[in-house]
Image (spheres, helix red, strand yellow):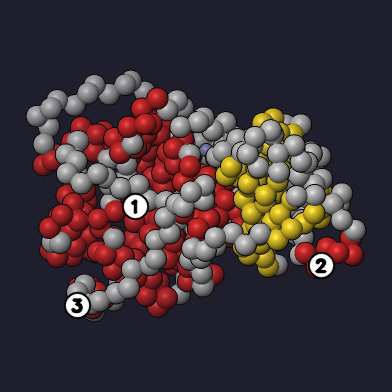
Amino acid sequence: MSAINHHVPDAMLAAYAAGTLPHAFAVAVASHVSLCPKCRVALEAHQAVGGAVLEDTNAVAVSSSLKDSILAQLDNPFTPEPVFERNGIYPGPVMEAMQGRAPKWKKLGMGVRQDILSSDAHGSVRLLYIPSGQAVPDHSHNGLEMTLVLQGSFSDETGRFGVGDIEIADETLEHTPVADPGDACICLAATDARLRFSALMPRLLQPLFRI
Amino acid sequence: MPRQEREPVSQSKTDYSQQTMWMLAVRDNRDRTAFAALFDHFAPRLKGFIIRSGASAHQAEEIVQDVMLTIWRKASMFDPHRAQVSAWIYQIARNRQIDIARKENRPMPEELKEEPGMEPDASQILGLEQEAGQLKQALANLKPEQREIIEKAYLGELTHQEISAQTGLPLGTIKSRIRLGLERLRHELKDLKQ
Ligand SMILES: [Zn+2]
């Protein structure tokens, strides 16, 4: 496997384990962990801390009927939650965000395409397709953005990002990612705010494309 | 911390902690008595834990019920080479609380499964138990303020911006153990460097 050089910061893995990351970032972190054994190890270490906290929590007596009620339900039929397997370059959590379908690309111009997987007031998750040699449009961040490379690679002022690498950028980072030569770069981009692609298109068009 | 000597091969699973024994009996033999013992140990702690994260006593019991049923149903996913029972249950409980709060399923990493017919590695399971015991001890030894911050973080009361990367807990050695548990599943990870 190729080496992953850009990882999820430890505090973010702890927040993911505790469930306090916004949904969009949780999709990106779960996807990176699916590809990255190092972050999986770190995540499971945080779960071990969570387990230690649980063990140490003061017990509160449960009602006397609870145990029998649960034991009586053990044989009840239940529907297992669907498991989304990795499909090609798309890890399970991305397949889940796409609800098992293939990407539905929409052209953004200059060969760049996107597929918005979810978008609401708390953030958005999208796939981006950037042809080789093409700049990922310069965008101003209104918050935090996580970009996970699924195919190809891009480079910017902070380094090179290949498959499995995750870039975490906040509004203080002025950067211009460019897709490297080779396969088109496909990334998962998660934000906790709306993105503004300032160089790509007039502001008036932005609502149309929801970016 | 001195490196642990490799456990002798003769070490048997009877040395596992009670919780691990119960969970393996549930996983491998669908043992209801062992499940009842897990309930007696974890249900009151889960209830306290869930109430601390803001649920009413009634809601907490509903979540405890969901978590206990999930333990029974997903027992095949429990891997004692990588996780203590408490760590595994912690994650199930947090998932359940989040799913209920947000009315949507939390994104989860792809699960790694054992190849069918893999022999358990008692020294790895015991080694992980030892590390987890030391982690628990380290948590107990923290200053009360420091410990409260950690409890808040893992109860889901802090945002990622509020969680400091420096928790004061030594996670390096348990990571080494978990990495061994992962390598057991995926031979291509053998070269993985920290
Ligand atoms: Zn990583």
State whether residue B151 appears in this view. Answer: no
Q: Residue at x 19, y 26 (%)?
A: B7
| A27 horizontally vs B126: left or right | right
Q: Which subunit holds the residue at mark 2?
A: A
- Quickly name the residue at label 2: A207
- Quickly name the residue at label 3: A72
Whole-percent x, y for residue B173 in the image: 39, 30
- Quickly name the residue at label 1: B88
Q: Residue at x 82, y 45 (%)?
A: A138
Of the numbered discs 3 and 2, the one sitting upstream in the chain is: 3
Tag nearer the camera, 1 or 2: 2
Question: Which element is circle 3 on?
Answer: helix
Amino acid found under the numbered disc labelled 3: Ala
Q: Residue at x 19, y 41 (%)?
A: B118
Q: Are marks 1 and 3 on the same chain?
A: no
Amino acid found under the numbered disc labelled 2: Pro
